[in-house]
Image (cartoon, rainbow, N blue to C red):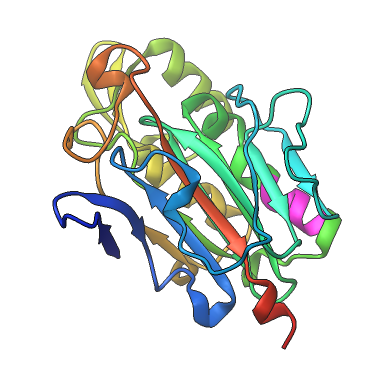
């Protein structure tokens, strides 16, 4: 994990995970912090980069971009995952305690960005996105690399019975990602849930990299809906294929 600083060297602007993906793979990615909550966090020399951001609704639908989008193009509806095989298209998600998940298939040259809150995670947005990558682009989960970004951590993220009921119904290993704290309450490890779901559908454990940093614990770096009680701001995370690499 590396953290890039502002020009003043005072605060980290974004986080990258070289072991997940890097320029050597023809991929650029970042997990944003509160100090640069916009798409400029991704260094690039490309003048043709198109940034795609959509309305997020805590669902499981994936927007598939299999042709070059037009600058300024909008996409009706709500989407919590974006998948593309198009170079110089930066797919982004916004989070403030939810889990930003980035994916890269180096074999079929496909990337994805996912917004996984507890609703989306419990409903299976991660395996659904992997299934969409397989159906549309022929991706094999065993070839996919997954980067799991900063989110509400197992140190702080307490949930109640309605959340636990949904988790029990949809995830057989639910006891492995919770720690009971009282009657009808438990600490939920969202990042562990995402990891286990990815592995359950074929992603190799060594292909998953996690930034084990809690957004609630670090007000200096992250916005947090749970800590602040309102949406004060969000962090942007994104991933993009390099056109220069694709042209080789």
With respect to residue 139, does 239 lie above or below? above
With respect to residue 142, does 218 lie above or below? above
Is there any visible trace of residue 211 in the rendered image?
A: no
Q: Position of 144 compared to 219: left or right?
A: right
* x then y, percent, for residue 2: 28, 65
* x then y, percent, for residue 217: 17, 34
* x then y, percent, for residue 184: 31, 12
Q: Position of 47 compared to 77: left or right?
A: left
With respect to residue 146, does 19 lie above or below? below
Is there any visible trace of residue 152 in the rendered image?
A: yes
Quarter of the image where the N terminus is located = bottom left
Q: Nearer the viewer, residue 184 or 149?
A: 149
Q: Residue at x 53, y 37 (%)?
A: 115
Q: Residue at x 80, y 46 (%)?
A: 70
Quarter of the image where the C terminus is located = bottom right
With respect to residue 73, does 113 lie above or below? below
* x then y, percent, for residue 186: 28, 23
Q: Main secondary structure of the magenta part?
A: helix
Q: Residue furthest bottom?
A: 248
Q: Nearer the viewer, residue 213 or 40?
A: 40
Which stretch is magenta? 129-135
Q: Residue at x 75, y 72 (%)?
A: 108
| Among the 4 quarters of the image, the one containing residue 246 | bottom right
User: Is residue 132 covered in magenta?
Assistant: yes
Q: Nearer the viewer, residue 175 or 93?
A: 93
């Amino acid at each position: 994990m590396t953290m890039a600083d502002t020009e003043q060297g005072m605060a980290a602007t974004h986080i990258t995970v070289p072991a997940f993906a890097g320029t050597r793979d023809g991929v650029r990615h970042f997990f944003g912090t509160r100090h640069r909550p916009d798409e400029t966090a991704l260094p690039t020399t490309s003048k043709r980069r198109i940034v795609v951001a959509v309305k997020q609704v805590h669902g499981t639908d994936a927007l598939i971009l299999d042709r070059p989008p037009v600058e300024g193009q909008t996409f009706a509806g709500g989407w919590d995952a974006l998948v593309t095989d198009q170079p110089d298209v930066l797919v982004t998600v916004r989070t403030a305690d939810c889990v930003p998940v980035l994916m890269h298939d180096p074999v079929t040259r496909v990337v994805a960005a996912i917004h996984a809150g507890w609703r989306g995670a419990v409903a299976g947005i991660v395996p659904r996105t992997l299934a969409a990558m397989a159906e549309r682009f022929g991706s094999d989960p065993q070839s996919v690399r997954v980067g799991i970004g900063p989110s509400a951590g197992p140190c702080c993220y307490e949930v109640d019975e309605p959340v636990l009921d949904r988790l029990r119904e949809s995830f057989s290993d639910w006891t492995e990602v919770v720690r009971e704290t009282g009657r009808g309450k438990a600490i939920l490890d969202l990042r562990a849930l995402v990891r286990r779901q990815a592995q359950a559908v074929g992603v190799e454990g060594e292909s998953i990299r996690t930034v084990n940093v809690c957004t609630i614990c670090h007000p200096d770096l992250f916005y947090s809906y749970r800590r602040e009680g309102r949406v004060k701001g969000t962090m942007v995370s994104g991933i993009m294929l390099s056109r220069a690499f694709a042209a080789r």
